[in-house]
Image (cartoon, grey):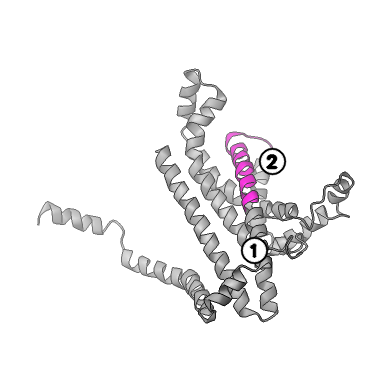
């Protein structure tokens, strides 16, 4: 038996059961992701292009897209900054109650989104604890895009923290110590050594928070006020059309939202791969 044959056999045995595990993976992906998306595309086949275009370009639909995308992007950007700070504190410092603080980061994962929406509305409404203090200053949060952004920040922050935190924990601090020895300041050390390693996970966390924000419904439906052309989000418009038995309209709105989300995430993932290659 030749050396090449032995090496090939060893390579085949590196991942035992690859065919079985790959088959289960493809089956799971098909049942959970591909079939629902295929059903959405199938339901849209009954729409003519003219009707689909009329629904997609309706001023109310466009306004809902603008609210959903702008608030989700703003919330994800703020979460990227705050998530980096929180992850940095959790990894680089020791303080009393650190484990409790770390556990609270995951609270939005466990808390039902409707409960989060009710709680935020109670806080920031005109008669709420915080809203009543801001109302005399002319600052209104509930039932505005700002309130929607705060709700999306609440549910999106764990995605950024849990994405950046493992990378920070695995960073080699010898590089930072060497830079300090050579006379580099803290800001330059962070900008030149730490930040390039954190850009890929930051982009990943931003993409996850942004994707979650686009499709979020429960935590936003209460604090948004659901005012058409002002604070109505795209998922709420889809639900409204379904309640009115306008299945064609709901399918058209959902399909266009799916395409927009896919294109945006594709761009973010491309930037992420480019940032990872650059850091290497």
Q: Residues within 10 Å of mark 2 (few under 14, many from 20)?
A: few
Q: How many marks?
A: 2
**Residue found at x 20% / y 58%:** 9
The x, y position of residue 180, in whole percent, is 50, 21
Is residue 120 placed above or below 20 in the rendered structure? above
Does 89 lie within the magenta span?
yes
Question: What residue sits 47% from the left and 47% below the top?
Answer: 271
In this view of the protein, which residue sits in the foreground, 106 or 204? Answer: 204
Query: Which quarter of the figure is the N terminus placed in?
Result: bottom left
In the displayed image of the protein, which residue is found farthest to the left?
Answer: 1
Which mark is first along the chain, 1 or 2? 1
Residue 2 visible in the displayed image: yes
Is residue 87 positioned above or below 55 on the image? above
Q: Disc 1 marks which residue?
A: 62
Say which residue label 2 marks: 97
**Quadrant of the frame with the C terminus:** top left
Q: Look at the picture and state if 269 lies above or below 256.
A: above
Q: Residue at x 51, y 61 (%)?
A: 262
Q: Which residues are magenta?
A: 73-96
């Amino acid at each position: 038996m030749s050396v090449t044959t032995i090496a090939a056999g060893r390579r085949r045995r590196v991942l035992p059961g690859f065919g079985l595990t790959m088959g289960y993976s493809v089956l799971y992906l098909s049942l959970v992701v591909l079939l629902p998306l295929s059903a959405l595309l199938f339901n849209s086949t009954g729409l003519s292009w003219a009707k689909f275009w009329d629904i997609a370009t309706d001023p109310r639909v466009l306004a809902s897209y603008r609210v959903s995308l702008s608030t989700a992007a703003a919330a994800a950007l703020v979460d990227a900054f705050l998530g980096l700070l929180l992850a940095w504190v959790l990894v680089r410092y020791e303080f009393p109650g650190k484990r409790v603080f770390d556990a609270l980061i995951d609270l939005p994962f466990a808390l039902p989104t409707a409960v989060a929406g009710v709680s935020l509305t109670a806080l920031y409404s005109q008669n709420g604890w915080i809203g009543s203090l801001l109302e005399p200053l002319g600052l209104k949060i509930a039932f505005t895009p700002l309130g929607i952004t705060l709700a999306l920040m609440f549910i999106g922050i764990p995605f950024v923290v849990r994405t950046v935190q493992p990378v920070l924990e695995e960073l080699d601090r010898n590089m930072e110590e060497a830079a300090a020895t050579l006379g580099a300041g803290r800001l330059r050390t962070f900008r030149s050594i730490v930040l390039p390693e954190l850009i890929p996970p930051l982009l990943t966390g931003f993409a996850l928070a942004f994707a979650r924000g686009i499709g979020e419904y429960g935590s936003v439906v209460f604090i948004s006020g659901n005012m058409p052309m002002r604070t109505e989000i795209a998922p709420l418009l889809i639900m409204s059309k379904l309640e009115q038995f306008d299945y064609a309209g709901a399918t058209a709105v959902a399909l266009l939202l799916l395409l927009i989300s896919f294109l945006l995430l594709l761009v973010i993932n491309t930037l992420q791969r480019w940032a990872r290659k650059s850091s290497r």
